[in-house]
Amino acid sequence: MRLPSGPDINLQQVDEYVQWKLNGAPIPIIHFHTNNAHALHQHLKESGVIVENIVDFGWIGYTFICYDPNGNPIKVWKANDLLEQE
């Protein structure tokens, strides 16, 4: 799948899926960048998607995790505006 704003995404079917964990919590293997984490978070929440709270990492930016219909975590990230200017 070619995205208009950047890299290709290649999906590959596997025979077995292994969920990596850190301190018992699943590690998202898919990360998306957004220009407005708060608006996307609210939209997903209103659409019935399971979303965790937004975490503010200060000068780095904002992130939250949402879950696909199978319960797989997906991380969404919004860089701090100062980082995006570099």
Image: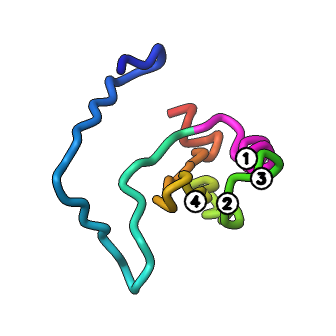
Q: What secondary structure is found at the residue carrying circle 3?
A: helix
Extreme left residue here?
15
Q: Which numbered disc covers residue 67? A: none
Which of pointers 4 and 2 lies earlier in the amino acid sequence? Answer: 2
Extreme front residue here?
15
Q: Which residues are magenta?
A: 34-44
Residue underneath mark 2: 51
Dominant SS of magenta comes to helix
| Closest to the observer, 13 or 33 | 13
**From the viewer's perspective, is 60 left or right of 12?**
right
Q: Amino acid at mark 4?
A: Ile
Which of pointers 4 and 1 lies earlier in the amino acid sequence? Answer: 1
Contact (Cβ within 8 Å) of mark 4 with mark 1: no
Residue underneath mark 3: 45
Contact (Cβ within 8 Å) of mark 4 with mark 2: yes
Q: Where, by quadrant of the figure, is residue 59 drawn?
A: bottom right
> Disc 2 to disc 3, how far (Cα)?
6 Å
At x 32%, y 24%, the residue is 8
Q: Amino acid at mark 1?
A: Leu
